Each structure stands twice: as structure tokens, then as C-alpha cells.
Image: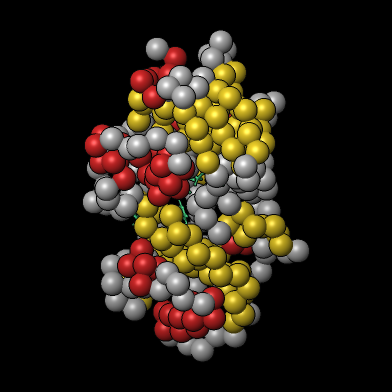
């Protein structure tokens, strides 16, 4: 039996861990966060959860649709039937569609946590260096060894995977080519508490030209902050331009843009600002599904490899598990 270390307990790492366990492999999962979930992240507040990262997910692939069905049956996800709209040229208009959209319940982390249930998971554990002796990987956190493993899976964002690998090996041309173009671009997230809703909608897709990309009424989802909490995501271009800005600057932009879109002054308080450094797919990045290098006993999985969505992160993790079992 191979002992496999998986760094990253987001959707990709958890899917890989669950699939490998199902094949009879022994896995140990490490994550620096307090809870698994990664960018499927709902922040707990006194008024309920706030979805700061992924807002919902869709299933186009049959295997992922079947997985969603199982999650529905055990109650860790539910359908989100938000009333949708699009914002374009300064106006917001209804844009209903028939797409099935899912959310985790009571928080976005729930399906990830469900896949890791019963597995060996070390949270609050940042892996900061690695060693490779040609056969085995050793993991370290703050100079302390976390053990030796026959195989390593990195299910963390591209830029973090590159930094970690460089602590142990010289990246040859093939690995270097994976890191040549940034796969993930940033996203600023802001939550606004309004005194009333300016729109009769739950989710608004902001179309081209706006510094915003998405607005969602949290109270339209079970377990989330009730009342008029609106979660905003900024576009990749804006988020890149203001990457190092203070929260106060981002908050001011959020207030101004929402009032502009609503066409009226609003009584609003900014309750949270969160910068995601590695958030959304760079459309210029070439996709690979997953990466497996048998001679290095190394696999890489994640949405960055397979195309910036929850479904693609799951597929990447499952496909890597299949490659590792051959
Ligand atoms: P991650 O979720 O990033 O997981 C990586 C994990 O690795 C993290 O838990 C992290 O803590 C851990 N980690 C990193 N480095 C280390 C280390 N050195 N040691 C230990 N642990 C480490 N997708 C959708 O389908 N629909 C959406 O509506 C949507 N909206 C989004 C909005 C935002 C703002 C963001 C940021 C993402 C959104 N996404 C959405 C994308 C979706 O969240 C991701 O595709 C998916 O969650 C990625 O999963 P992953 O496992 O590849 O990576
Ligand atoms: P989806 O199929 O609901 O949406 C895909 C895209 O189609 C949307 O981004 C939107 O532009 C358009 N769209 C869908 N329904 C629409 C409607 N009713 N009216 C107008 N436009 C509509 O979801 P999918 O493909 O599963 O993608 C997940 C979502 O996650 C996308 O919205 C994507 O932009 C978002 N995302 C955001 C990230 C961030 O960092 N902000 C990171 C990764 C994904």
C-alpha cells in the first residue's frame, strides 16, 4: 500500500483523497486552514454564514452530477434557486434561466468536509518545505517533519505549488512550463449590509466593462446572513489593479458602484472585505485536467489545472486519483 500525502483540503484535494481511499490507498491530508474547504469558504458571523468565495456550483459532467446527487441525498448541498439578473450599461434586468445551481449547506465547505469524513486530516497545518530523496517525500511545517510518504499530491493554487516544489527539487523545463503563466487571477470580495434591497433579485451577473463581476443577496441561501447582506465580487482586472489597496479603498469603491447601479443613495455598511490572491482562472492559461509525474511520485490537481470552477476542481482531483492507481 502506498502512503500518499495530499497538501490542500479544498474541493480538489478532498475529491482526490476520497477517490484514493475508495481504491484502498492510505492518504494523509494537510491544510493550513482551520477547516477544510479552501475557496469554498463561508465565513461564520453572528447573523449566519457569508459566502466570501464560491457562490454556487453547476454540474455539466455526468460523474460530477452523480456526486451532486449523492450530496443532495445526504443533505450537504441543496439547490439554490436565486432570482437572477444581469447588470449592463448601468441597468439591472431580469435574466432567469433553467440552470441547476447548488450550494453547500449549512455552508459552502459542507460537501468538502463530507468527502473527508473519516480520513486522516490535519488542519491548521501549513506545509512550508519539502524534501525528495528520489523515492520518498518528506513534508515540513516550521522545521518539524510531518512524516515521509511514497507519493505527494499538491492540491493547492499554482503559485503556492511552485513555491513549495522549489524547496525540494529543481524544476525542469516541463514543470517550469506549468508555472510560466499565472493560472489564477485575484478577486476582491466585499459584503455590504443594506437597509433595503434596491432590486427584486438574488444574484446579479455584472457584464463587461464593470469593475464588479457578481452581486448576491446572502439571505436567499439557507443558513446565510438574513436581511439585506449583499456579497460583491470585483472583476479580475479591478482586483489586479487594486491588489495591494487597503480595505477602506475597496469598501469605498463597493459603496459607490452599488449606489451607481441602484441609481439611488443607499444606507449601507461594509461588514467584510476579503482579498483572494488566487481566485479565478486566467483565460490565457492552457488547461491540463491534472498533472502526474510518476518519476517524481508527484501529482498536481486543482481548479487552476482544469479550469477555475468547483466542478473542474473535483474532476481534477478524481482524475489524478485514477492516474495514481494505474
Ligand atoms: P482551493 O479551494 O484553493 O484549496 C486549496 C487548499 O490548499 C486550501 O484549503 C488552502 O488552505 C490549502 N493550502 C494552500 N497552501 C497550503 C500549504 N502550503 N500547506 C497546507 N495547506 C495549503 N467556482 C464555482 O464553481 N462557482 C462560483 O460561484 C465560484 N465563485 C468563486 C468566487 C471566488 C471569490 C473565488 C475565490 C472562487 C470561486 N470559484 C467558484 C472557484 C472555486 O472556489 C474553486 O474552483 C475551487 O474551490 C478550487 O478548489 P481547489 O481544491 O482547487 O483549491
Ligand atoms: P454558470 O453556468 O451559472 O455561469 C457561467 C457564466 O455564464 C456566468 O459567469 C455568467 O457570465 C453567465 N451566465 C450564467 N447564467 C446567466 C444568466 N442567467 N444571466 C446572465 N449571465 C449568465 O456557472 P459556472 O459555469 O458553473 O461558473 C461558476 C461561476 O463562478 C461563474 O459565474 C464564474 O464567473 C464564477 N467564478 C468566479 C470566480 C471569482 O474569483 N470571482 C472564480 C471562479 C468562478
Q: Is residue 124 left or right of residue 283?
A: right
Residue that appears at 63% across and 45% down: 142
Along the line of sight, the residue nearer the viewer: 277 or 79: 277
Which quadrant is the N terminus positioned in? top right
The tally of labels here is 0
In front of the other: 123 or 105: 123
Q: Residue at x 49, y 81 (%)?
A: 249
> Which residue is farthest right?
46
From the viewer's perspective, is residue 309 above or below residue 83? Answer: above
Residue sitting nearer the eye, 142 or 320: 142
Query: Which corner quadrant of the image does residue 287 belong to?
Result: top left
Can you give x and y, in whole percent of width and height, for residue 69 in the image? 53, 30
Residue 272, image x, y percentages? 60, 70
Residue 312 seen in the current view: yes
Asked if residue 94 can be seen in this view, the reply is no
Q: Residue furthest bottom?
A: 265
Query: Residue at 36% across / 67% down in the picture?
Result: 240
Q: Position of residue 190 (x, y in %)?
A: 53, 69
Residue 235 image-quadrant placement: bottom left
Residue at the (66%, 69%) spot, across then down: 227
* Residue 315: percent from left, percent from top: 42, 31
Q: For residue 3, which quarter of the picture?
A: top right
Q: Is residue 90 left or right of residue 324?
A: left
Amino acid at each position: 500500500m502506498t502512503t500518499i500525502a495530499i497538501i490542500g483540503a479544498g474541493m480538489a484535494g478532498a475529491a482526490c483523497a476520497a477517490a484514493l481511499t475508495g481504491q484502498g490507498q492510505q492518504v494523509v491530508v494537510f491544510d493550513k486552514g482551520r477547516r477544510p474547504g479552501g475557496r469554498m469558504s463561508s465565513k461564520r458571523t453572528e447573523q449566519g454564514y457569508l459566502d466570501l468565495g464560491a457562490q454556487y456550483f453547476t454540474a455539466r459532467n455526468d460523474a460530477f452530477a452523480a456526486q451532486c446527487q449523492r450530496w443532495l441525498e445526504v443533505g450537504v448541498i441543496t439547490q439554490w434557486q436565486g432570482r437572477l439578473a444581469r447588470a449592463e450599461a448601468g441597468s439591472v434586468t431580469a435574466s432567469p434561466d433553467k440552470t441547476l445551481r447548488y450550494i453547500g449547506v449549512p455552508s459552502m465547505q459542507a460537501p468538502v468536509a463530507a468527502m473527508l469524513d473519516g480520513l486522516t486530516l490535519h488542519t491548521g497545518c501549513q506545509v512550508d518545505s519539502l524534501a525528495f530523496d528520489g523515492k520518498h517525500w518528506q513534508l515540513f511545517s516550521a522545521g518539524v517533519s510531518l512524516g515521509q510518504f511514497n507519493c505527494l499530491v499538491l492540491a493547492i493554487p499554482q503559485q503556492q505549488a511552485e513555491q513549495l516544489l522549489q524547496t525540494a527539487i529543481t524544476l525542469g523545463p516541463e514543470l517550469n512550463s506549468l508555472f510560466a503563466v499565472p493560472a489564477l487571477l485575484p478577486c476582491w470580495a466585499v459584503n455590504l449590509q443594506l437597509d433595503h434591497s434596491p432590486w427584486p433579485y438574488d444574484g446579479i451577473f455584472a457584464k463587461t466593462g464593470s469593475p464588479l463581476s457578481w452581486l448576491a443577496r446572502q439571505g436567499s441561501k439557507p443558513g446565510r446572513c438574513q436581511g439585506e447582506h449583499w456579497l460583491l465580487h470585483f472583476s479580475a482586472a479591478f482586483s489586479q489593479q487594486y491588489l495591494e489597496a487597503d480595505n477602506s479603498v475597496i469598501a469605498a469603491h463597493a459603496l459607490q458602484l452599488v449606489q451607481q447601479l441602484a441609481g439611488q443613495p443607499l444606507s449601507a455598511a461594509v461588514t467584510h472585505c476579503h482579498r483572494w490572491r488566487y481566485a479565478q482562472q486566467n483565460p490565457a492559461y492552457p488547461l491540463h485536467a491534472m498533472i502526474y509525474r510518476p518519476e517524481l511520485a508527484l501529482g498536481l490537481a486543482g481548479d487552476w489545472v482544469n479550469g477555475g470552477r468547483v466542478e473542474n476542481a473535483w474532476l481534477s482531483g478524481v482524475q489524478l486519483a485514477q492516474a495514481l492507481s494505474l
